[in-house]
Structure formats: C-alpha cells, structure tokens
Image (cartoon, rainbow, N blue to C red):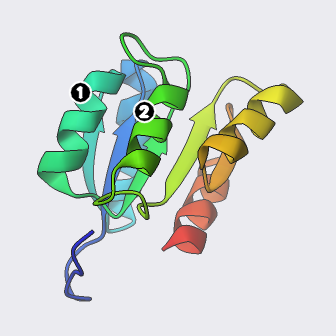
Amino acid sequence: MANRNSSQKKKILIVDDEVNFLKIIKLNLEAKGYAVVTALEGEEALRKLKSENPDVVILDIMLPKLNGDEVCRCIRSDPVFNKTPVIMLTGKDADVDRIVARVIGADIYITKPSDLEQLNNAIKKVL
C-alpha cells in the first residue's frame, strides 16, 4: 500500500450487503473525518480495493458472490494489499467464525449489532 500524506483523510472501504446498515456506518465514519468508499458484495470489494487503495477494510462475512472470508483471503494473498488492515463486522458470533477470521488474517472481529464507538476504536487501533 502506498504511503499517504498524513494530512490526507484516511480512506475506509466498507463492504456489506445491508444497504441501510452501510449508510449508517458510512455517515458515522464520514462525520469522524474519514473518506468512505462502499461495496455491496465481495467481487465489487476487490475491484474497489484496487481502484481506491483504502487504509482499512471493514468487511461483513455474509456477502453475495464472494463471501467475506474469501475476500479477506484474497486481500492477504495480494502482495500490494496484504498489509491493509481488515476489520470483520458481522452478525456471525460463533467461536468458530472468530477463529476462522483470525486464521485467514482479519485484524479485528466485531459482531453486529455493535455500538459505533466500538467500531471507531477498532479503526483507530489498526491505523
């Protein structure tokens, strides 16, 4: 990932197929001063990863076409983006889901519903 000038807004790619949830998170993060790009499914997320070069990816697991686990694996296998922090934000809360997320390279795992402050803290932590 290219180094960014510290005066630039940090860019976040949010990937979720729930449009209303996506809008809420986007508005919250923009209010915190982030530039936000969104994707509704996994293949779109990978295209936007390459075109937008985000500083952080917030990723749901249950996505159409290419699920979040597969997207995370693709990010981690790409030498250009493999250091990009990935925050899983998902409704799946079983221990096995958390373990799989860690194994495939997610930096942080948060279950929905989460409070927005928890997500904001996670973003600060990975940046």
Q: Nearer the viewer, residue 105 or 38?
A: 105
Q: Secondary structure at mark 1?
A: helix
Category of crowding for the residue at label 1, using alpha-carbon neighbours closer than 10 angstroms: few (below 14), some (14–19), many (at least 20): some
Which quadrant would residue 37 be assigned to in this image?
A: top left
Residue 49: image location, x then y, percent: 25, 46
Quick check: 51 above or below 98?
below
Q: Which residue is mark 1?
A: 44
Outermost residue to the right? 95
Task: Report the residue that reaches farthest toward the left.
Answer: 51
Determine crowd level at label 2: few under 14, some 14-19, many 20+ residues with C-alpha closer than 10 A.
many
Please give the name of the residue rendered at 58% of the width and 41% of the height, measured from the top-left corner.
88
Q: Position of residue 17 (x, y in %)?
A: 40, 19
Residue 26 shows in this picture: no
Residue nearest the viewer, comparing 48 with 23 = 48
Q: Is residue 5 visible?
A: yes
Percent x, y of residue 20: 40, 23
Q: Quadrant of residue 47?
A: top left
Quadrant of the image for the N terminus? bottom left
Judged left or right of residue 115, residue 79 is left
Q: Earlier in the sequence, mark 1 or mark 2?
A: 1
Which labelled disc corresponds to residue 71?
Answer: 2
Position of 23 relative to 64 (above/below): below
Q: Amino acid at mark 2?
A: Val
Assess whether mark 2 and mark 1 are in contact (beta carbons under 8 angstroms). no
